[in-house]
Amino acid sequence: MWSCNKRYCPAIVFIAMFCSCALATSRDMVGCHMFGHTRTVKINGCVQFTLTTNACRGFCPSYSTPSPNGSSNPTPNKSSGQLLNAATSWKRKT
């Protein structure tokens, strides 16, 4: 049967835990994380432009509620999320 030397076993456990933590990315982390993606759009005969989008990655709770009857909002529902929602937008420096 395999046995662990008292001298080396704690070091092996520490190294295994350190490596697993060091290799984690935002995709692997628990919770909701925002990330952005920028790309250049080129269409023949048209102006070239840069498009930046924001998105959430991970477990991001979201919900949708009906808009109030007297509101000037043209959409019947309002979607909200933990980091992003359809009611707000902002510019980000890239």
Image: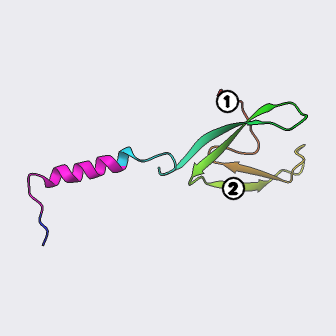
State which mark lies toward you, 2 or 1: 1
Q: Which residues are magenta?
A: 4-20
The kind of secondary structure the magenta stretch mainly shows is helix
At x 27%, y 52%, the residue is 16
Task: Point out residue 27 in the picture as x, y percentages from the top left corner.
Answer: 52, 49
Q: Secondary structure at mark 1?
A: loop
Image spot of residue 1 (x, y percent): 12, 73
Which residue is depicted at the point 14% across and 68% down? Answer: 2
Left or right of 82 in this view: 2: left
Is residue 84 shown above or below 94? Answer: below
Tell me what residue is drawn at x 50 percent, y 45 percent: 26
- Can you tell which mark lies on residue 36? none
Residue 25 as seen in the image, left or right of residue 88: left
Q: Amino acid at mark 2?
A: Tyr
The answer to which of 6 and 91 lies nearer the viewer is 6
Residue at the image point whose x is 8% and y is 52% from the top: 7
Q: Which amino acid, mark 1?
A: Arg
Instruction: Assess disc 1: are there few (<14), some (14-19) or many (≥20) residues with their C-alpha within 10 Å of its C-alpha.
Output: few
Side of 29 relative to 39 (left or right): left
| Residue 17 is one of the magenta-drawn residues | yes
First in sequence: mark 2 vs mark 1: 2
Q: Residue furthest top?
A: 93
The picture places residue 46, in percent across and down from the top left corner, at: 89, 33
Q: Is residue 48 magenta?
A: no
Question: Residue pushed farthest bottom?
Answer: 1
Relative to 63, is 45 above or below?
above
Residue indicated by mark 2 = 63
Residue position for label 1 = 92
